Amino acid sequence: MNFKVTKSDTVFHGKVFDVRIDEIEYNGTGNKSFRQVAVHPGGAVVIPVKDDGKIILITQYRYPHNEVVLELPAGKLEKGEDPKVCALRELTEETGYSANEISKLGKIFTTPGFCSEVLHIYLAKGLKPGNHAREEGEEDIKLVELTLEEIENKIKNGEIVDGKTISGIYMYSLSAERRV
């Protein structure tokens, strides 16, 4: 790093994220600048793969875009929560399924230019159907089962635009677990 943080203030505390403004000073020149950071606890994304190879996605209304989005199940980490626990919880909450096997495929920085959010990507197999436990506002979620090829086609034609879903599907398509 060619700078040091000289001042840091959290100027907004929200339910989903906080906003922090850091004053920085560049080494050598002493010039000052500011960085605004959306401080987010992170989350977990799960790729639920059924025994027949189909992947379970969900449709969910996304307020900032005023659209229903086709995406992988995911959710925000609770304070101190293990991302694997979050992935399993979100799988059940949003789809009703539980998993006998879960493995981490990787992580992504969603918007590293201004946000601290890290999403942990998990593959879930050995799925068992059950009852969902959706939160308020998630009542209209619908399950969609697609093959990897169908999902890739929806990404290509712009029907799937969610970044975590595109990243997760790409990680899955490259994984050794997919070939097992």
Image (cartoon, rainbow, N blue to C red):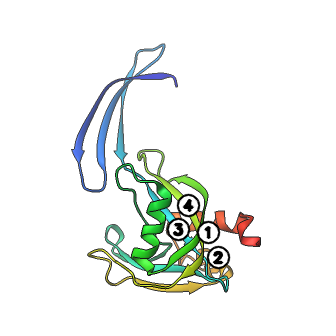
First of labels 3, 1 by sequence position: 3
Q: Position of residue 145 (x, y in %)?
A: 56, 86
Task: Name above or below for residue 11 compared with residue 68.
Answer: above
Q: In the image shown, does 179 or 4 lie closer to the viewer?
A: 179
C-alpha distance separating marks 3 and 4: 6 Å
Of pointers 4 and 1, the one earlier in the residue sequence: 4
* Mark closer to the observer (3, 1): 3
Which mark is first along the chain, 4 or 2? 4
Most foreground residue, 25 or 133? 133
Counting residues from the start of the chain, the first of labels 3 and 2 encountered is 3
| Residue shown at 35% from the left, 46% from the top | 38
Q: Amino acid at mark 2?
A: Glu
Estimate how packed mark 3 is, as few (under 14), some (14 to 19) or many (20 or more) residues with alpha carbons within 10 Å: many
Q: Which residue in the structure is indicated by mark 4?
A: 121
The amino acid beneath tag 4 is Ile
How far across and down, in percent of the image, does residue 173 sit?
70, 68
In the image as oriented, which residue stretches furthest toward the front?
A: 100
Identify the disc placed on residue 169. Answer: 1
- One can see residue 110 in this view: no
- Closer to the observer: label 3 or label 2? 3
Q: Identify residue for label 3.
A: 46
